[in-house]
Image (cartoon, grey):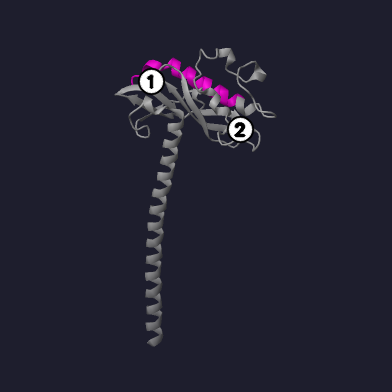
Amino acid sequence: MELFASIRRNSLGLAIFAVLTAGLIAITHQLTDHTIKNNILDAQISAFNEILPANLYDNDLTKDTAILPADPLLGSDEGIKIHIARKNGEVSGIIFETIAPRGYNGNLDMLVAIDKNGVVTGSRVISHKETPGLGDKVDLKKSKWILSFANKSLENPSLKGWGVKKDGGDFDQFTGATITPRAVVRAVKNTLIYFDQHKDTLLAY
């Protein structure tokens, strides 16, 4: 009897321990998940503030969004998200979560901000797998090359100028790495073309 009582006590102790452990894991997951989401949101807001002047909008860019249908100009066979900037209730610009296909090591995820007049206010590569020291210079942390797109449009430069210098365009390439900057230049140009083709719809959101 004493043996059975001991087994019951041990079993009960293990059960209580298991419940407490499961509860602790659940609480930790909730707290960690909340922190991760907040960190992602903070990083997103920071990126938006870098590529879109604060005086162009007075709304919450993280919530004022829409999904565009798939289009080759946006580099994806799936719909992409846009963030709509508004000033006094009117659309003042669009931030595209566009994609630059065919980088040296695959696709590059980008943000391209375009104001209502079709002028790029800023762009960033937010995710890539490019080679350190070469293609990764598209990252602002590695070089200021990505800043060269600010204040550019389909008229500045001309369409012919929307390429790297090796291809006769206006944009620098990197020493020993042309494929990646070529992909990024093409993606920004194509996003501008998409904006121009769908301007009326985009500004009516």
Q: In the displayed orientation, state which residue is furthest to the right.
A: 176
State the image coordinates of residue 66 (x, y, percent, origin top left). Answer: 37, 29
Q: Is residue 16 above or below residue 99?
A: below
State the image coordinates of residue 105 (x, y, percent, origin top left). Answer: 62, 34
- Splitting the image into 4 quarters, where does residue 147 fall? top right
Residue 192 painted magenta: yes
Q: Is residue 197 above or below residue 50?
A: above
- Splitting the image into 4 quarters, where does residue 82 fall? top left
- Asked whether, in this view, residue 172 is left or right of residue 188, the answer is right
Q: CA distance from mark 1 to mark 2?
A: 31 Å
Query: Please, what secondary structure does the residue beneath circle 1 have?
Result: helix
Q: Check residue 42 in the rendering and tell me which mark sits there, or answer none.
A: none
Q: Nearer the viewer, residue 120 or 65?
A: 120
- Asked whether, in this view, residue 51 is left or right of residue 108, the answer is left
Q: Nearer the viewer, residue 35 or 33?
A: 35
Q: Main secondary structure of the magenta part?
A: helix
Q: In the displayed orientation, state which residue is furthest to the left.
A: 89
The structure residue drawn at horizontal position 57% and vertical position 30%, both measured from the top left corner, is 144
Q: Which residues are magenta?
A: 182-205
| Quarter of the figure that contains the N terminus | bottom left
State the image coordinates of residue 26 (x, y, percent, origin top left). Answer: 39, 57
Q: Check residue 202 in the rendering and tell me which mark sits there, or answer none.
A: 1
Residue to which mark 2 is pinned: 137
Q: Residues within 10 Å of mark 1 (few under 14, many from 20)?
A: some
- Asked whether, in this view, residue 133 is left or right of residue 151, the answer is right
Q: Is residue 43 above or below residue 1?
A: above
The structure residue drawn at horizontal position 61% and vertical position 33%, both measured from the top left corner, is 137
- Asked whether, in this view, residue 163 is left or right of residue 8, the answer is right
